[in-house]
Image (cartoon, rainbow, N blue to C red):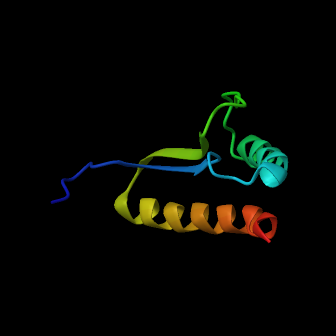
Amino acid sequence: MLQAGDAFQVTSYINLQNVNAEKREAFITAAISLRQENGVRRAMRDEQSFVVMKRVKDLTQAKAIKETSEQLDNLRATFELLLR
């Protein structure tokens, strides 16, 4: 049950572990660009499989739901063309 003052965090990430080797560089390039747009400062490592794309903290429940939808739409728009 929600309490007054509850805060939510929304974090989106991608998993590069099973990306086809021939598409991996394109995914990494797109991920780096999107992370920069989202203000993520931590550097990506080549061996890293889970990559944080965006993290937003201290949201109300309604804002967290909206942020989740926006992050998913942004991930889809960024990576959809690379999957073909």
Residue 42: x and y, percent?
Answer: 66, 28
Residue at x 81% of width, y 54% of height: 23
Residue at x 70% of width, y 28% of height: 45
Residue at x 66% of width, y 37% of height: 40
Q: Quadrant of the C terminus?
A: bottom right
**Relative to 4, 26 lies left or right:** right
Q: Nearer the viewer, residue 61 or 17?
A: 17
Residue at x 77% of width, y 42% of height: 32
Residue 37: x and y, percent?
Answer: 76, 46
**Relative to 1, 53 lies left or right:** right
Residue 26: x and y, percent?
Answer: 84, 51
Q: Quadrant of the N terminus?
A: bottom left
Q: Nearer the viewer, residue 4 or 11?
A: 11
The image quarter in which residue 78 lies: bottom right
- Residue farthest along the left direction in this orientation: 1
**Relative to 21, 54 lies left or right:** left
- Residue farthest along the front direction in this orientation: 21
Residue 29: x and y, percent?
Answer: 83, 45
Q: Nearer the viewer, residue 67 or 51?
A: 51
**Relative to 23, 72 lies left or right:** left
Q: How many marks?
A: 0
The image quarter in which residue 47 lies: top right
